[in-house]
Image (cartoon, rainbow, N blue to C red):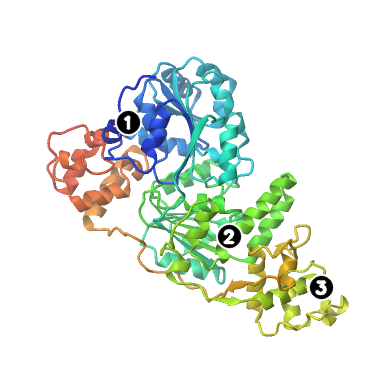
Amino acid sequence: MKMTQSPGSILRDTFGYASFRGLQEQVIEHVLGDQHALVVMPTGTGKSLCYQIPALSRGGSTVVVSPLIALMHDQVSALQQLGVSAAALNSTLTSAEQHQVEQSWLAGDIKLLYVAPERATSSGFLRRLGDTQVNLFAIDEAHCVSQWGHDFRPEYLQLTRLWETHPLVPRLALTATADGQTQREIVQRLQLEPGRTFLGGFDRPNIRYTIQLRQQERGQVQRFLAQQPEDVSGIIYCLSRRKVEEMAQWLSGQGYRALPYHAGLDNATRQKHQRMFQLNEANIMVATIAFGMGVDKPDVRFVMHLDLPKSVEAYYQETGRGGRDGLPAEAYMLYGLNDAVTLYQMMQQSQAAPEIKQVERLKLRSLLGLCETVRCRRQVLLEYFGDRCEPCGNCDTCLEPVASWDATTAAQKALSAVYRTGQRFGVGYLSLLLRGQLEPRMQSNGHANLPTFGVGKELSDKEWHSVFRQLVAHGYLEVNMEGHGGLQFTARSAAMLKGAEQLQLRRDTQAKAASAKALGPARVSTPLFERLREVRLRLSRDQSVPPYVIFHDSTLYEMAEKRPRTAAELRQISGVGESKLARYGDIFLQALGGDPGTPGDGQL
């Protein structure tokens, strides 16, 4: 298909960026050569440009499969702000509105059409697809096609029906989260061969990772939030709906503008709360994972987990919702062995096949290993995805190195206690046994007479809990999924029990607030920056769009730092393309104290 405009000119004139980042240019050239591709790039590094620029470079339209309505809405709004003809087909439209969008698409007036996978594979859509000139199929959040993944959507398996009528049209699958197994499954299920996989790395250097043992949860939350600048946006993830409601209510009582979000709320309430968060009418969203891929808010400054997610992939995906604008953000997680017990039990109760349950257990063990590591957390996180980095200096274990101790003998005592009690009991019981604290059941079942009774008096109850927790994380013990949180042996247990291995464990310390050291290249808020934010907020409210759709914070920071005085100087600011210059140039130049120049259509 003939190119109508060069990618470089679209990048500059439409999107307002001077140069491509990372693999963007390579991906775009590959797609414009009518080749299939899988793109794995961190959230916030510009994956969407990899399909948006090819869509605008040639005639015809691009069909973008996107999993959530809220995500489509934000992306369409952002493109329309840039002067791009984009639309979405989803259930929020009336029949008349859907008909109008379809007619515009069939007439060739829409360059990017966003559709949910359910609609994309419907018979009606497939009939209309055959009558259109398609230049690209873009499959966003492509990891949803993986049955082994954390966001599996069965509808993604049917997407191959899309290219039955257009077999020569290139297909571009995009995701931020995919280990090697998931990458292979995406390529196979979306029929991307022959093609190429572009791996842009997994590092998000602007995110600081902090993981702490849960000790006094609300006190830890309070200390963390007290260190955040006033009114910054953040997400707090909880495992249960009840905990979401209780935490949101408690935070509201502490003076925070917090809202709950979970699948138990009706759809209208969920949409209302998400919209309030996007418009900065609420600054903290307390949520289950139901609040997920639809989060396209670039100025989220922290993501907090009050319970363990199910895997490293889930953790990476969820923490990646912070700092999408490239500015500093924090990922803060609290955990405990009870989290692992709960998740293991949930896995056992699920209807998944045994082999999937086994993979899930291994993934959870990897996450526990990340929690318990004494190494740089970023190194451990990236190595999980096959990536590497030097010690980052921007995680808790780098900023405050963790003390460790030789726990080989303690581990052997712990394993012996598990074995001699029949691999049926939990940490509390086993700790009492090792410390020689008589419990009624111990006499009735004869455990008070075991050789392991009282052999661990040198460690406190908390220290034994730490040992057992870390033995689970290192794969020497696992939760008995048939019981009630009891511990049992794994294939690694015997070697440790027989003294064939040595073990270093981290020494737990009293939890304190996350490090107050500067979060990387922090940007300082100034009166001018705040004035620009106020202008942006007024514009966003007038149009009922999120503020970041007008301009990202990073663009406002650059305006405040460089203080452009003319339209030509404003045009040099990253993120100011031709359409936004014409629409908002006069308004922002006036706020900056510059020369508005010739009036454009920027006055709303």
The residue lying at 42 percent from left, 31 percent from top is 30
Label 2 secondary element: loop
Q: Nearer the viewer, mark 1 or mark 2?
A: 1
- Res. 65 mark: none
Q: Which residue is disc 2 drawn over?
A: 307
> Which comes sooner in the sequence, label 1 or label 3?
1
Nearest to the observer: residue 499 or residue 11: 499
Nearest to the observer: residue 78 or residue 29: 29
Indicate the quadrant containing the C terminus: top left, top right, bottom left or bottom right.
top left
The residue lying at 18 percent from left, 32 percent from top is 600
At label 3, the amino acid type is Arg
Picture mark count: 3
The residue lying at 37 percent from left, 20 percent from top is 59
Q: Which residue is disc 1 drawn over?
A: 7
422 over 163 or under it: above or below:
below
At label 2, the amino acid type is Asp
At label 1, the amino acid type is Pro
Which x, y percent locates residue 119?
A: 55, 27
Q: Is residue 375 left or right of residue 453?
A: left
Alpha carbon separation for disc pair 1 and 2: 44 Å
Q: Which residue is disc 3 drawn over?
A: 420
